Structures are given as structure tokens and as C-alpha cells.
Amino acid sequence: MNHYADATSIRLIQDNLGTHTKGSFYKVFSPEVARKFTSKLEFHFTPKHGSWLNMAEIEFSSLSRQCLNRRFDSLTSLETEAKAWEMQRNELSVRIHWSFTVDAAREKLKKLYPDIYKDKQPT
């Protein structure tokens, strides 16, 4: 509880994969300690489809590849370059093109899921 000890609330933003709940704290900590943690936590979940957290990850990846792919001689120059990159992205109204369709996902992830037709024989 040393981190953010003065905070009145802490927002925990999670996607919908392997999410945790307040009950998770009670599985690991004593009830008193778990209560201290959970009394400050606000759980927020991203939408199941088109997660804005995914969009943020994509933007950070773009920032890393397009701007942060070199060394900077000072924190000031890093901040200046990052702000210039952000302004350019905003001026161009850059949008994310979602190219991973449901069909593409099924094909790419088919090894992770059992074949629902494997055991069924036509009658």
C-alpha cells in the first residue's frame, strides 16, 4: 500500500481477456489487506469489440516505430519530438484500419480451439 497511499481511488482498466475481480485479492491476501486494496479500486473494462485499449496499444506502437526509434540527447528533445509526432497524427486525422476480420481470426486461431465438427459424423 506504499504506492499511491494518498489516492482516494485507483482506476484499474482491463481488457476482457483474463480479467481480475475484487475476489482475486481475497484469494491472495488476508481479508484485511484485500479490503484495503479493493476499497480504493475502481474496475473498468474495455468494450468486448473494438477495444479502445487495443487502439492505444496500436498508437504506442506507431509512436515507437515512427518517433522513438532513435536516441535523444535530452528529455526536452524527446518531449519536443513526441509532441510534434502527436500533432502531425492529429492533423492528418490518422485512423486505425481494422483488417483482422472474423474469418481471418478463425483461420489464424483455429489451432487454439477444438474442431466442433471433428467428433460429429453426418447422420
Image (spheres, rainbow, N blue to C red):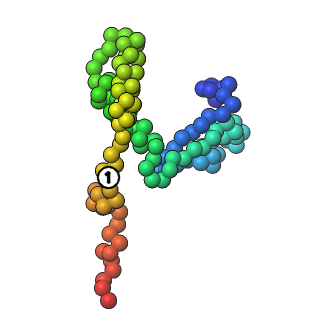
Q: Which amino acid does label 1 sit on?
A: Phe
Who's the residue at 68% across and 25% down the image?
Answer: 6
- Is residue 121 positioned above or below 61 on the image? below
Dot 1 alpha-carbon crowd within 10 angstroms: few under 14, some 14 to 19, many 20 or more = few
Residue 60 image point, x, y percent: 38, 33
Q: Quarter of the image holding residue 92?
A: top left
Q: Quarter of the image holding residue 95?
A: top left
Who's the residue at 35% across and 36% down the image?
Answer: 94
Exactly how many numbered labels are in the figure?
Answer: 1
- The residue nearer to you, when weighing 29 against 92, is 92
- Is residue 17 positioned above or below 121 on the image? above
Who's the residue at 35% across and 72% down the image?
Answer: 116
Residue beneath label 1, please?
Answer: 100
User: Is residue 95 visible in this depiction of the protein?
Assistant: yes
- In this rendering, position of residue 27 left or right of residue 101: right
User: Is residue 109 visible in this depiction of the protein?
Assistant: no
| The furthest residue to the right | 32
- The residue nearer to you, when weighing 17 against 31, is 17
Residue 84 image point, x, y percent: 36, 21
Who's the residue at 29% across and 30% down the image?
Answer: 65
Residue 45 image point, x, y percent: 54, 47
Circle 1 sits in a helix, a strand or a loop, which is it? loop
